[in-house]
Image: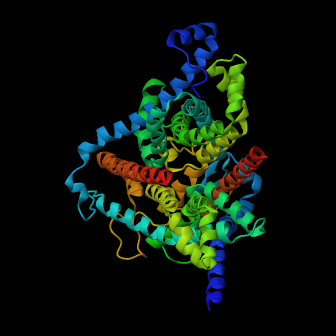
Amino acid sequence: MKKYKETIMKYIFFIAACTSILSVALICFFVFVNGIPAISKIGVFHFLLGKVWRPSNDLYGILPMILGSIYVTAGAILVGVPIGLLTAIYMARFCNKKAYRYFKPAIELLAGIPSVVYGFFGLVLIVPFIREYFGGPGNSILAASILLGIMILPTIIGVSESAIRAVPNQYYEGALALGASHERSVFFVLLPAAKSGVMAAVILGIGRAIGETMAVIMVAGNQARMPNGILNGVRTLTANIVIEMGYATDLHREALIGTAVVLFVFILIINLLFSVIKRRAKS
Amino acid sequence: MNQINKQTLSQKLKAYKRSPLSFLLLILVILATAITLLTLLSLVGYILVKGIPYLSLKLFALHYTTENVSLLPALINTIIMTFLALLIAAPLGIFSAVYLAEYAKRGNKIVEVVRITSETLSGIPSIVYGLFGLLFFVTTLKWGYSMLAGAFTLAIMILPLIMRTTEEALKSVPDTFREGSFGLGAGKLRTVFRIVLPSAVPGILAGVILATGRIVGETAALIFTAGTVANIPQNLMSSGRTLAVHMYTLSSEGLHVGEAYATAVVLLFIVLAINSFSAFIAKRISKG
């Protein structure tokens, strides 16, 4: 009887472990089955490289959105990585224990703030600021890049901080012994040694930025046309789905799911890169 | 680490004079940290200053009407949604972590697949979850826009988080505990439930709290699964918006910006509470 119970529970644990496999399979199945027919109906090249998105005329080109996502993500990396990395260096090697006790929860709070709140902050502060001082409508690639750059900060800081901390202290001591200053030792010895961890942080940040939806919608302007200039509006892949999914029907709806397929493929590639780099960091 | 090169201030200044690059790097690092912290302060400060004046008792009325965009129904929905999603995801996540940490043998192929899939799950953007929820729970299973569809979608989303934190907590339980339990004649199952899981509770709890934070802040995965009806749902099969969705609709409608500020304040307070609670638990873990 007792043996019986053990075996049953073992299988229950096993089945629970399989839910994540099942979930990924279901997500892939439903997104791809609903999206790929539309892509082939529209034509892969018309869909991916078409410059016009006008569902009322049956024109479904998502190149503007693909470029939009890429530009906004690149902007976020330009804003977020330098600040995040330098902050991580400060947290790991410059800051004393007492200050660290306050800074660490602050970074965690930054990670916990919901994306709508970020979006709203961007809408009421960053957008008017850009409109005032740089011109243009305010809702722009620039606004989205700054906002996303802020949003990926906690990811970049967290991952690169632990990467820098993971470098053996002998490296640092060795550099000091050779006469390098504290700053030089950290930047020219510790940082290169933590390179792959920092790369992992950047890739994770890219994944966050490209997948972010609500905050981007609130500040990016969302015009479905080819991006022109960082002070003009842009629509990302994620925004395209949320904005039109509510009322889309038939091929339009399927084209939106096709948009999700493209986004999903991007994310899978990023995930793959991330795990490759993590494996390499381990070995 | 500062023990090995202790310097007085004047020595430091002299050293910086010899090597301006070091000084520049120091300035850069301090500047970046200041920017990060100032951004956080200005975000929180701006929203608190602008939002608190709009917090009135009226906003906590039991019913949402077009004149009084009460946030209480959304707050209650958030609690229901959190509870439901955790109810689904926590047992699954904990059991699956138990399998990975206690039962699976080394080099098991399935374990490798489970790890890869849970890593994939944690990288999928919330809008893809939302779309999947729409296609599967709402359309294929014909649940319609409902709290249940939203809860299942969120449960899948937080599953990898709970799995990972629980697995780490289980792994940090020393093997001597298990050996002691086996030595006293307990079976594997009894050891897991009576010895290993209870000692891993703080770690598991930390994961659950993190998951709660994600549920509270989620918008994109809920708009097309739980819908945007602004009142308390009659039952689990009817639609209801959570606080984050409420805030998004308010700010995109643009009619009730003041109330959107107030909702942001409430959201910030919830996040703050969740974070301090998880810090409290983390402190208890490190104390042992």
Left or right of residue B279: residue B70: left
Q: Residue at x 65, y 79 (%)?
A: A10
Note whether residue A227 is visible: no
Q: Residue at x 66, y 57 (%)?
A: B119
Note whether residue B14 is visible: yes
Q: How many marks?
A: 0
Left or right of residue A185: residue B37: left
Q: Residue at x 38, y 64 (%)?
A: B79
Colouring of the image: rainbow
Left or right of residue B145: residue B46: left
Towards the viewer: A211 or A127: A211
Picture coordinates of residue B239, whole percent (x, y): 41, 70
Q: Residue B43 falls in which quadrant of the image?
A: top left
Picture coordinates of residue A100, whole percent (x, y): 48, 35
Left or right of residue B70: residue A207: right
Rendered view: B218 above or below B105: above
In which quadrant of the rendered image does the N terminus of chain B lie? top right
Picture coordinates of residue A265, whole percent (x, y): 71, 55
Furthest residue to the left? B57
Picture coordinates of residue A224, whole percent (x, y): 58, 46
Towards the viewer: B142 or B35: B35
Towards the viewer: A195 or B225: A195
Furthest residue to the bottom? A1
Towards the viewer: A60 or B98: B98
